[in-house]
Image: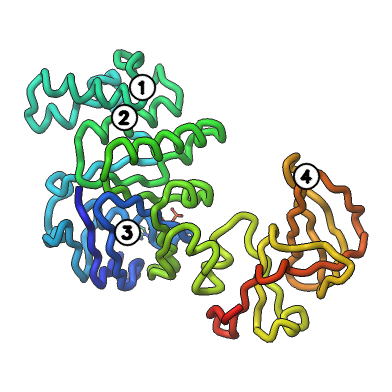
Amino acid sequence: MANIELRSVRKSFGAFEVIKGVDMDIRSGEFMVFVGPSGCGKSTLLRLIAGLEDITSGQLLFDGERVNDCAPSRRGIAMVFQSYALYPHMDVFQNMAFGMKLSGAGREDIEKRVKKAAAMLQIEKLLDRLPRQLSGGQRQRVAIGRAIVRDPRVFLFDEPLSNLDAALRVSTRIEIARLHKEIGNATMVYVTHDQVEAMTLADRICVLRDGVVEQIGTPLELYNHPQSLFVAGFIGSPKMNFLTGRHSQPFGCATVGVRAEHIEITSEGVWSGRVIHSENLGSDTYVYLDIEAQEPVIVRQPGTVAFKPGEALRFSPMPREFHRFDAKGKPLPR
Ligand code: ATP
């Protein structure tokens, strides 16, 4: 499996620069997830690695070897898209075997590899079906199976689960995590909008913002030690609460950030607000508080709690469970 290096990689479409100098090392066997707001360049970066787009300037290296000008078919990659991209007139077996056939592999070898991948993904019973006879989740498993059969150096995933319903997303996500372990040290690069996918699948997450890398780290590094206000606000759902002005003054900083699960409702609280509404999820309740600022503060309370709209409450961050940021959005010591 390959390690991937990006050195000052830039990409422009005409006069429009989309990737603005990215440096990154993706280690052999690593599961790297790209996240960031819509349009920040996640898919473009993945397509540059795949060779589906030309790099405008900079270097892309696989195992130390420059691959900028290497055709996608010669990079040893397999890509799984959101839109499965299966051949509709071929059955599952033929779809999975197609790449190997093209590269001239023998029948026995093809059969062995397809069956092994099908077993891994529990789709052995579907091998003679056509794509239209499969559910969305099964189709996506076939698309993943087709990637496995090719035995690539690098797997590239572009939002592979976003067409699936909630339950299938969860089971296919778990499947992909299992696959990463089972295949051993496959290098995987994965683009998603989904916080849970990023947090659960990634060895490391790369947060992109407007064509540059904002921060790269393990999911917990990003969650607990964001290096900017932007990352603090981007990683985690619900979003971290940010309080400014008179609310952040007692903390001696421009902005204080505190997550919904790190707020205590207590009569001693430094802040006060009024309940706007509560969302009851069964396991937790999210309470939305109006603090006369731009956005309400969201507080998570375990279990089911009942607050009346309009009720006045005092609340505080739990000890040490807050983040302080300076006027430039950089973190200050807690
Ligand atoms: P999303 O999360 O919405 O899928 P993304 O982060 O994956 O977004 P990209 O698809 O990489 O973003 O697009 C980044 C920017 O580049 C966007 O502004 C997009 O319009 C632009 N872009 C992408 N492909 C092309 C192209 N072929 N020609 C011109 N502009 C493009």
**Residue, disc 4:** 303
Residue at 41% over, 25% down: 138
> Measured from the top left, where is residue 233 in percent x and y?
58, 66
For disc 3, does the CB lie below 8 Å from ligand 1? Answer: yes
How many angstroms separate mark 2 from mark 4 (CA)? 44 Å
Judged left or right of residue 65, residue 222 is right
Q: How far separated are the C-alphas under marks 2 and 3?
A: 23 Å
Q: What is the C-alpha distance between the residues marked 3 and 4?
A: 42 Å
Badge nearest the viewer, 3 or 4: 4
The residue that label 2 is drawn on is 86
- Considering depth in this image, is 157 or 223 the residue closer to the camera? 223
Q: Is residue 318 left or right of residue 327?
A: right
Ligand 1: image quarter:
bottom left
Amino acid type assigned to the residue bearing label 3 in the image: Leu
Could you tell me which secondary element the residue under label 1 belongs to? helix
| Label 1 crowd bin: few (<14), some (14–19), many (20+), radius 10 Å | many
Q: To which residue does mark 1 refer?
A: 131
Q: Of tags 2 and 4, which is closer to the observer?
A: 4
Residue 331 at what x, y percent from top left? 55, 78
Residue count near mark 4 (Cα–Cα under 10 Å), binned few <14, some 14–19, many ≥20:
few
For marks 3 and 4 on the same chain, the one whose residue lies earlier in the sequence = 3
Answer whether labels 1 and 2 touch (C-beta < 8 Å): yes
Task: Tell me if 177 is positioned left or right of 7 in this view.
Answer: right
**In the image as oriented, which residue stretches furthest toward the front?**
319
Q: What element carries label 2?
A: loop
Q: Tell me the residue at 27%/49% (across/down).
A: 29
Task: Identify residue type, mark 1.
Answer: Pro
Q: Quadrant of residue 85?
A: top left
Q: Between marks 3 and 1, how big is the CA–CA gap?
A: 29 Å
Q: Is mark 3 on a helix, strand or loop?
A: helix
Name which of mark 3 and mark 1 comes first in the sequence: 3
